[in-house]
Image (cartoon, rainbow, N blue to C red):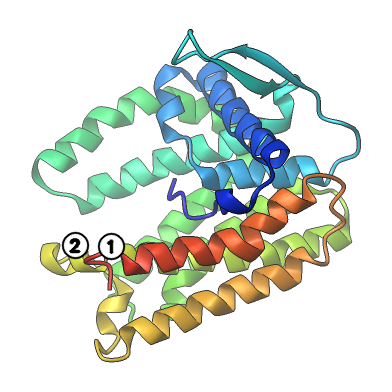
């Protein structure tokens, strides 16, 4: 939904990029097939990472096949032969989208608020289907949104507390990628660090808009003189801790692609985002 967890494409080999794109396209296809055409617009690199991670911890060779793109029939794309591999990430994307719509309805005003009210019934049925299939994801996301809303209404000024709900929801979702208790513990740490990274970077990107609109943003409380250095140090901490956790995983395939995301993509993304005009 945010698109902050993605690969550093120039550093991928051609075959690695083809695989990365194939998983991305497979997730797009799964969303459309399971939740309708409009659900494809919810696609993000964050859930492509989740799909790759989910597939990487399982035995067997994932087959790919070339078929025509639903959006562009003149173009052919590579897809996973077995779309079950991206079922959980697709459901997570749909559930997260629905709760984001509810959150925006509560936060926005005017025409934006009306727009989200219009979207709510469109995605309500898809959300119910995803929630039936993965009630555990539904539960943790609902708890995350409730916790986040409570902190925002209280005007929380602690960065650690404000980032905690997002970190915890990613922790719980990543733990679904393995049945092994040891791997679950590692995935828990990896998910927490990535969730914290996503929250902090999104807060940094939205800061100027939130100041203008009067919306909640925990980074409003950071001294302007030290803002850039402080947020960068926080993000580097998340990236480094995520890398340490990643190295403990028993990755069976796609290790170089996932490594590219963890070691290069996260840093490249936040440096680009923070250098964009208006985000710092």
The percent coordinates of residue 25 (x first, y second) are 58, 27
- Residue appearing at x 27%, y 47% in the figure: 104
Q: Which residue is mark 2?
A: 209
Horizontal and vertical percent position of residue 213 = 13, 62
Report which quarter residue 227 is drawn in: bottom left
The answer to whether one can see residue 168 in this image is: no
Q: Is residue 241 left or right of residue 57?
A: left
Q: Which picture quadrant has residue 218?
A: bottom left
Q: Residue furthest toward the left?
A: 110
Residue at the spot 32% in from the left edge and 90% down from the top edge: 226
Question: In front here: 140 or 67?
Answer: 67
Q: Secondary structure at mark 2?
A: helix
- Mark seen at residue 206: 1
Discs 1, 2 touching: Cβ within 8 Å: yes
Q: Which of the 4 quarters of the picture holds residue 14?
A: top right
Residue 53 in the image, given as x and y percentages of width and height: 72, 47
In this picture, residue 249 sits left or right of residue 77 = right
**Left or right, residue 149 beside residue 23:** left
Identify the disc placed on residue 29. Answer: none
Residue 248, above or below 87? below
Q: Is residue 184 visible in this depiction of the protein?
A: yes
**In percent of the image, x 83 and y 47: which residue is there?**
57
Tell which of 214 and 266 is nearer to you: 266
Which element type, helix, strand or loop, lies under badge 1? Answer: helix
* Quarter of the figure that contains the C terminus: bottom left
Residue at the top extreme, as displayed? 73
Q: Residue at x 62, y 53 (%)?
A: 11
Mark 1: few/some/many CA within 10 Å (<14, 14-19, 20+): some
Please say if 175 is above or below 195.
Answer: above
**Where does the image place residue 199, in percent across and percent down from the top left?**
44, 64
């Amino acid at each position: 939904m945010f698109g902050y967890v993605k690969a550093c494409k120039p550093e991928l080999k051609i075959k690695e990029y083809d695989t990365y794109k194939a998983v991305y396209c497979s997730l797009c296809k799964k969303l459309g097939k399971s939740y309708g055409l409009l659900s494809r617009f919810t696609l993000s690199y964050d859930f492509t990472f989740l799909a790759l991670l989910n597939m990487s911890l399982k035995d067997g060779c994932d087959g790919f096949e070339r078929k025509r793109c639903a959006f562009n029939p003149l173009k052919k794309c590579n897809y996973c032969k077995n779309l079950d591999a991206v079922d959980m990430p697709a459901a997570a994307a749909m559930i997260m989208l629905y709760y984001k719509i509810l959150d925006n309805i509560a936060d926005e005003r005017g025409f934006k608020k009306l727009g989200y009210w219009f979207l709510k019934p469109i995605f309500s049925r898809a959300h119910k289907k995803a929630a039936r299939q993965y009630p555990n994801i539904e539960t943790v996301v609902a708890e995350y949104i409730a916790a986040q809303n409570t902190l925002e209404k209280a005007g929380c000024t602690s960065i650690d507390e404000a980032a905690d709900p997002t970190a915890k929801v990613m922790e719980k979702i990543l733990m679904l990628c393995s049945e092994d208790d040891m791997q679950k513990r590692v995935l828990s740490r990896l998910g927490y660090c990535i969730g914290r990274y996503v929250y902090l970077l999104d807060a940094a990107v939205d800061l100027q808009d939130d100041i203008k609109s009067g919306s909640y943003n925990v980074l409003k409380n950071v001294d302007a003189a030290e803002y850039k250095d402080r947020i960068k140090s926080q993000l580097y901490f998340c990236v480094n801790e995520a890398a340490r956790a990643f190295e403990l995983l028993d990755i069976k395939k796609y290790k170089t692609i996932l490594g590219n995301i963890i070691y290069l993509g996260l840093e490249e993304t936040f440096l680009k985002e923070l250098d964009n005009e208006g985000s710092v």
